[in-house]
Image (tube, rainbow, N blue to C red):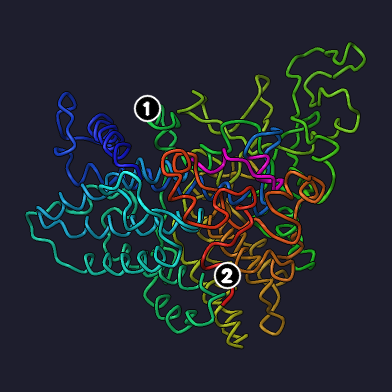
Amino acid sequence: MNKLRYILLAFLLSTVIVGCKKSWLDVNIDPNTPSNTTAAVSTRLPWVQHYFLYAQGTAGVRASLITQQILSIVVGSHQSEAAGWNPIAGMSTTPYQFFFVGSAANIQDLIDKAEAEQAYHYIGAAKAIRAMGFMLMTDWYGEMPYTEALGAAVTPKFDDGKTIFEGCLKEIDEAIEYFKMTQPATATPLSAGDSWNNGDVNKWIKLCYGLKARWLNNLSKKSSLYNPDAILDALSKAPLSNAEGTVINHEDVKENSGDVLFSDPLKTSIVFNNIAMNENFRVTKWFVDILTNFDGRGVEDPRADKLIPWAQFGTPKEFVRSQGVDMTSPIRFSGKGPVRAEYNAKDDTIRINNNTRVISAHSWYVSSSDPARWGDTVYVSLKSSSIGYNGDVSDIYTFRDGTVGATGTFYSRPDAPTYLLTYAEMCFIKAEVLFKRGDKAGAFNAYKEGILANINLMNSKLATYGNVNPSKSPMTQDKIDAFITNGIGTASDITLKKIMTQKYIAMAYSQQNWNDMRRYDYSPEVYQGWAVPYEYLNTAAAQIKIPLGKYFRRVRQVSHEINYNSANVAASHPNALSDDIWSFPVWWDTNE
């Protein structure tokens, strides 16, 4: 990263650190005299956590567009183009910006401050987050400044993915060792500044081992490096129950000031900030299908009601669940749909389209003059409302007559949790490893346990809402039992397709889902019913970026590096500045 930018941005973040208040953003230093050297470790860590979390959360949402979980209906936006596999530069920036500017720029200062008082657990947290951030960078962009990043070099060289990968593994091992140290009584306790695990060092250690298991499993294409025993060993020290995972809880509160870098609310969930502040996003038919008819058994997943949005229709009002947009159809390519639905909240009819159409009172409609688009009311947006951002009374998006325009979904609400690393993910990694070893019974047990772990973890949050509506209420035990008994198969018919498709559901809005899809070359034999989007197959510009026969493999470098470090960008990969760089695998995604 450019040294001048580092200095300026570090000063910006030091000002932020001493200027915000409330909850884990509380400050005990005079806000009138901000200084990079006066920020305490307990003040700096939550900001490092916050900005890394936003980087990985945004990457996860954009990965969900690439992998066909969701789409944007705003034609030409970087979100819409990502879903259509015609990527544009706008999708590249945010993960890079929030990691380097908000998080990484403060890590060394945090370590230095922690070393001075022997606050070893803060050093462990800093090293763990640094490793997570650079692993995200290489997963996202491939090559990246690493050994010279954040240092004195004005134009730091790029390191290859293998160097970054091995460096991140080394740093996570170092983090574990620091977490195992005993801090002196004079050192700041980790609980004073830890916004993720509330200072629980054992959970941090399990997080680190879980990350090792995840990353080592990502080497499945590297026959000389892939080590199932090492993965299973890491899993034995990773979370062994939902209680041991790292889950970040978010808040929807009135005093929720905007982020200095992006103006989004500080405490709301990253998915809400990315996709649920507006009405632009919809779920895909593929995602709906794997939730409603997994493995073709006709048994609906109890999570379907919670992961697919609902709205109220008709008189009297009735909740209806959204349909999914078929990305293998020409709806977006030639039909230019779906079009945003509108609602007539008046007590009288209205006329639209040059008075040629009459819209009944208290009813949905699409104002397009194209009759083919009038049925787009079946696609409900992922929008949630917010107490803090919208000044609303709740997080349910309603019209002035009280009709629910969108219920939101489990992950899209402002107070939705962020699943940084869960027991469910560990179960699915174990299932994948054991299946490849031929242990079908062990694989099935881990697979089943992963499904139940995710359902139970979701239900623990849903139970806090009460029975508000079909989306915002707990899953019932009878539906859970029916799905586990009749919907997921048995040890005799366990397949990799079942394991990976269920892992995808359990890790919705996760960057790791894109890593997994790339590892398996987007195969429909691994992901039930998956297919590339129709518009990609029929768009010449998209096929320049991702030539036919190739796949969406990485994100092009950000403009900051291209503009200010162009020589090193060009040297980092033969096609770094070519239009088709999006189709070139990152290091761990190439077969050996």
Q: Residue at (44%, 60%) from the top-left corner?
A: 421
Q: Residue at (54%, 38%) from the top-left corner?
A: 274
Q: Residue at (44%, 47%) from the top-left corner?
A: 567
Amino acid type at image mark 2 = Thr
Work out whether residue 306 can be spotted: no
- Compare residues 157 and 426 and report the one nearer the observer: 157
Indicate left or right for 198 with 428 as reference. left
Circle 1 SS class = loop
Residue tagged by mark 1? Answer: 255
Work out whether residue 207 can be spotted: yes
- Is mark 2 in CB contact (under 8 Å) with mark 1? no
Residue 179 within the magenta-colored segment of the rendering: no
Residue tagged by mark 2? Answer: 590
Would you place residue 512 above or below residue 389 in this image?
Answer: below
* Residue count near mark 2 (Cα–Cα under 10 Å), binned few <14, some 14–19, many ≥20: some
First of labels 2, 1 by sequence position: 1
Give the residues drawn in magenta, as a range: 79-94
| Position of the N terminus by quadrant | top left
* Residue count near mark 1 (Cα–Cα under 10 Å), binned few <14, some 14–19, many ≥20: some
- Compare residues 197 and 478 and report the one nearer the observer: 197
Would you place residue 258 above or below residue 489 in this image?
Answer: above
Measured in 3D between alpha carbons, the distance from the residue under mark 2 to the one under mark 1, in whole angstroms, is: 47 Å
Amino acid type at image mark 1 = Glu
Q: Residue at (78%, 36%) from the top-left corner?
A: 338
| Main secondary structure of the magenta stretch | helix
Circle 2 SS class = loop
- Compare residues 348 and 528 and report the one nearer the observer: 528
Q: Quadrant of residue 342?
A: top right
Indicate left or right for 162 with 363 as reference. left
Where does residue 349 sit, x and y in percent of width and height? 83, 14
